[in-house]
Image (cartoon, rainbow, N blue to C red):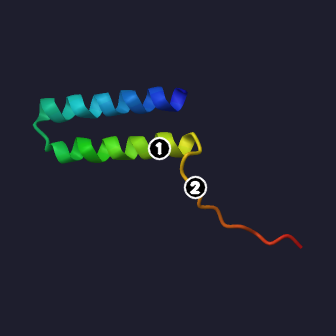
Amino acid sequence: MVNVLISILIVALVWMLTAVLGMPYLVSLVVTILAALYIFSAQGLLPARRAHRRSR
């Protein structure tokens, strides 16, 4: 739940900065997608990319 709140705050901050600084909205779109991926990976909705070791 904390990850979701942090991601929402980051996305809102980036959207405000893009509007104030006149940056292209592509920047805010990329940050929004990265925040969504962060939320999904933190909640376990994305498959983990971990190297599996063979047990001896």
Q: Quadrant of the N terminus?
A: top right
Please report whichever mark, 1 or 2, sits nearer to the chain's N-terminal start: 1
User: Residue at image x 76%, y 69%?
Assistant: 53
Residue that badge 1 annotates: 38
Residue that badge 2 annotates: 47
Is the residue marked by circle 2 packed among few (<14), some (14-19), or many (20+) residues within 10 Å? few
Q: What residue type is labelled 1?
A: Tyr
Q: How many callouts does the rendering have? A: 2
Q: What residue type is labelled 2?
A: Pro
Give the Cα separation between the discs numbered 1 and 2. Answer: 12 Å
User: Residue at image x 57%, y 55%?
Assistant: 47
For residue 22, side relative to residue 33 (left or right):
left
Q: In which quarter of the image is the C terminus?
A: bottom right
Mark identifier at residue 49: none
Q: Where 52 falls versus 3 (above or below)?
A: below
Depth check, front residue: 17 or 48: 48
Name of the residue lying farthest toward the right: 56
Q: Where is residue 52 in the image (x, y as percent from the top left)?
A: 71, 67
For residue 49, side relative to residue 20 (left or right):
right
